[in-house]
Amino acid sequence: MATNLTQRFTHEDNCDYIINTVFENIRKKLKINLKYDEIFFNAFNTISSSVFKAECSKNNLDHINHIVINELLKYIFKNIIKFNIEDITQTDIVKRTNEFFLERKHQDNLQDNPPDNPQRDNPQQYNQPDNLQQSNLPDNLQQLRQNFKTESVVDLGHNKIDIKKTIIHLEEYSSTILIDKIIDIKLLSIDIPNCDYIITESCNEFIFVENFSDNGKELYSEPYHIKIIPGNYTSEQLMLSLEDSINSVSSNNYNCRTNIINNKTCILNNDGNFDIMDCSLLSTLGFNGTTILKSQNQYISDNPIKLVKKRFITLTIYINESDIIFKERVYLDHKNDTYTHKVLNLQHKFNKSVYINDIIIDLDGYNCRNYDYSVELELSQYVI
């Protein structure tokens, strides 16, 4: 029966009931909102463990919950200045607390309609954070689901509270995590292989339409779509590949080259006029997006051909499919022939603990070409 009571007392639903009741009482009495942080967890963990140790022999969950709520409320009211409050000055905190105690000075119970308070042998037997003793709850009930290795336990002054730091390395674009009670996540570092190409799948398409006349009427062919094979090209290699690809789908004869002086692209149709449509290769070839490319037999780019690898990516990390927790620009170290290693040390704190089902990594279209990459995260998880 004791084990069953312990399981019921430490169950997530019961802990949430106690915490929500305490927060609601504070909100009603002082018109303030406590922050859901480590300072509160310290008080909650210490008082609840002490009350359970003293009262578990009565085998009454409602009785234990009632005492925990009252003891925690009393401690918070007496030490309200130690707690973090949402958007309120310390002067207002002291003023509102004093007003509340003046109003309730003849009442011992802080709840509006509490259950009967059973007689206790010693009202001073419950530990508070300033007089912390080690909890006697069984070790196996101090742990939540162990998905990953625990790296450390946070030590606040002389009090240890059960907040576990877990290091994980993500090497997939989507990873199922299934871990709860997370209060913050740190993005420690990222390792990305320097292996993506100059011409990638996102900038390799060229589209054109040929013009011809039929009895004086201007007609157009269907659009021709060609794709350059992704890879690292010199300007000469890219021009040769583009020319071969165009001539493979058209009966006309085309020449593609770059000017040896200004390095601008020239595309020539020796047999008629053609239009170049908006497509992903244009920027690489040096064409501006605003240039009209219609009804000419030759086009020269506005700018030099641009054959450079991506300088940076925007790393975006989602949890639970759609919630963005990090969005950070990461510059790639192309001087290094192997990997870009970046130490980031960014932190995302949650207003309340969350359950994480999955983590999704978005590398902004960067293709690792089947090489491994790694994102290192640290998850902080509190354990009741």
Image (cartoon, grey):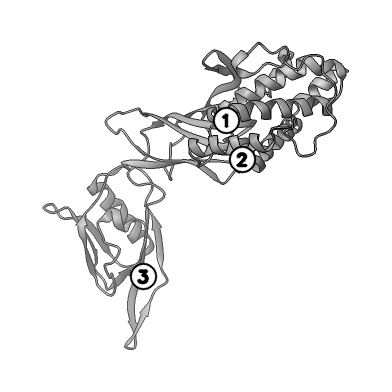
Q: Position of residue 338 (x, y in %)?
A: 35, 27
Query: Which residue is farthest left?
Result: 261
Number of residues whose C-alpha sits closer than 10 Å to that of mark 1, classed few (under 14), some (14–19) or many (20 or more): some
Q: Nearer the viewer, residue 296 or 289?
A: 289
Tell which tag, 3 or 2, sits nearer the viewer: 2
What amino acid does circle 2 point to? Leu
Q: Compute the Cα span from label 3 to label 1.
A: 74 Å
User: Residue 80: which disc?
Assistant: 1
Q: Are marks 2 and 1 in contact (CB under 8 Å)?
A: yes
Judging by the rendered image, the residue that carries numbered circle 2 is 30
Which sits earlier in the primary sequence, circle 2 or circle 1? 2
Which sits earlier in the primary sequence, circle 3 or circle 1? 1
User: Residue 318: which disc?
Assistant: none
Q: Position of residue 204 (x, y in %)?
A: 37, 52
Q: Is residue 361 left or right of residue 105?
A: left
Looking at the rendered structure, the secondary structure element under dot 2 is: helix
Q: Is residue 205 left or right of residue 271?
A: right
Image quadrant in which the C terminus is located: top right
Residue 154's quadrant in the figure? top right
Residue for point 75% across, 33% down = 13
Please say if 55 is above or below 224.
above
Number of residues whose C-alpha sits closer than 10 Å to that of mark 2, classed few (under 14), some (14–19) or many (20 or more): some
Judging by the rendered image, the residue that carries numbered circle 3 is 209
Residue for point 76% across, 17% down = 123
Looking at the rendered structure, the secondary structure element under dot 1 is: helix
Residue 160 seen in the current view: yes
Q: Nearer the viewer, residue 347 or 250?
A: 347
Q: Nearer the viewer, residue 336 or 166?
A: 166
